[in-house]
Amino acid sequence: MFRNQYDNDISTWSPQGRLHQIEYALEAVKQGSASVGLRSNTHVVLLALKRSSGELASHQQKLFRIDSHVGIAIAGLVSDARVLSNFMRTECMKSKMMYDRPIPGSRLVSLIGDKAQVNTQNYGRRPYGVGLLVGSYDEGTGPHLYECLPNANCLEYYAISIGAKSQSAKTYLEKFAKDFGEADLDALVMHGLHALRETLQQDKELNLNNCAIGIVGKDHDWELIEGDRLNGYLDRLETGASTTGATAAGDLVQGEAMDTTEL
Amino acid sequence: MSSIGTGYDVSVSTYSPDGRVFQVEYAGKAVENSGTAIGICVKDGVVLAVEKLIQSKLLVPGANRRIQNVDRHIGIATAGLLADGRHIVKRAREEAQGWRDIYRQPIDGPGYHGTAVGKGRQVAKTEIEKLNLEGMTCREAVKHAARIIYNVHDDAKDKEFELELSWICEESNGFHQAVPKDLAEEAEQLAK
């Protein structure tokens, strides 16, 4: 694609003022399967398409709990995601320990940004090859959604998508963005599923194995919805249920966060 | 001013035969391609303004600030790679804090009357030079800063932008803060 003499290492600028190694790291994110995030005035919902390497293989975990009030969705190099998740978890713990309060989302992503920036300026290092969608709920300021990328930019969004075919999801999200603020949790999740569905390839469908939903919000600690608990939502997606709120499928019970040790 | 530095332009530790360090010049290009940031120092304070080019409609307005604090009485507006800007602010904060630790007083600020960086810096600098900075108040400066940013924004080439304003003056008690909402809105209205 680029292939020029200025793209070999992170510490070389191109004559146009670009750092190609960062742009290549962004490609790694684009190769990952899609993750979607969106927020209302009370909740943040993260959704992901889980890929599997074959019929016999498991589907790659994409949603991780960082703290009771923070969760992330990833796209890209999973090993880099693990390193950043561990870092985030430690920072959350430190905050509770030192300041006796959960870390605000904005502060947490600033720490990620500063950490990622180091890898964009020191010779011999490489940028983290993973994009994170960070969803948090802060007591004072409410729900927040951030996109953290290998270029060390961490921006706050109403809704966003990363990974393969994420532009299709973004188009859906932009179209309905004005409805997200006031939407109830159910409607928000359905919007997210519609957006996620846009990223599927021709003959594929969302099923119990290949997708996951994460929710955090007001009086709602991080909850991961996977497997059978997705039934209600996927059925409504099939029947083309409206995205303007509906009774919950009864699945919104506090679940345990997935154990992430078996990566 | 363009010349090819082929061969001498891949390392920051290399001079070209005519005494230039091309890697540094290339880094400057990244700044030149960014949205404009200006600063003007007037009679009773300083005003900073940034043309924040909006990359996506889904971005939360008012978040993703380009102007940050370094100690209470200093602000920095950045242009170029945002992550590097944040890193520099981090270093500046460490320096300011270090100074306080040693000398038990706040560090001195920079010394220009007016300056601009980014895409529209030429136009902005021309506009700033026309102003009578010594006789201006901060309130007036805010309105001029907003007008200049709107002036340099190229509607044809660029997408929409968000205007970010900050000041340090008597009204802010000598603290670097965001310009109060009503004044900011008034300034923006006049600028449009």
Image: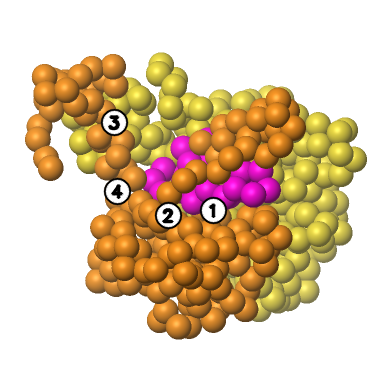
Chain colours: A yellow, B orange
The local secondary structure at tag 4 comes to helix
Mark 1 or 2, closer to the camera: 2
The residue tagged 4 is B32
The amino acid type, in three-letter code, at marker 3 is Val
Label 2 to label 3, Cα distance in Å? 25 Å
Chain for numbered disc 4 = B
User: Which residue does the image show at 71% across and 60% down from the upper left?
Assistant: B173
Mark 3 vs 4, N-terminal side: 3
> Label 3: which residue?
B24
How many other residues sit within 10 Å of disc 4, few (<14), some (14-19) or many (≥20)?
Answer: some
CA distance for labels 1 and 4: 18 Å
Residue closest to the eye, B62 or B49: B49
**What residue is rendered at 69% in x and 76% in y?**
A182
Check disc 3: other Cα within 10 Å, few if <14, some if 14-19, many if 20+: some
- Name the amino acid, label 2: His
- Secondary structure beneath dot 1 equals strand
Write down the chain letter for disc 2: B
Q: Are marks 3 and 4 on the same chain?
A: yes
Residue A108: percent from left, percent from top: 68, 41
Q: Do the residues labelled 1 and 2 touch (CB within 8 Å)?
A: no
Q: Mark 3 lies on which chain?
A: B
Disc on the earlier residue, 1 or 3: 3
Earlier-in-chain disc, 1 versus 4: 4
B69 falls in the magenta region: yes
If the image is split into quadrants, where does the C terminus of chain B sit?
A: bottom left
Residue A224 pos. (x, y %): 74, 47
In this picture, which residue range is highlighted in magenta? B68-87
Q: Of helix, strand and loop, which one carries label 3?
A: helix
Tell me the SS state at disc 2: loop
Q: Would you name the residue on which mark 2 appears?
A: B113
- Residue at image position (25%, 34%) is B25
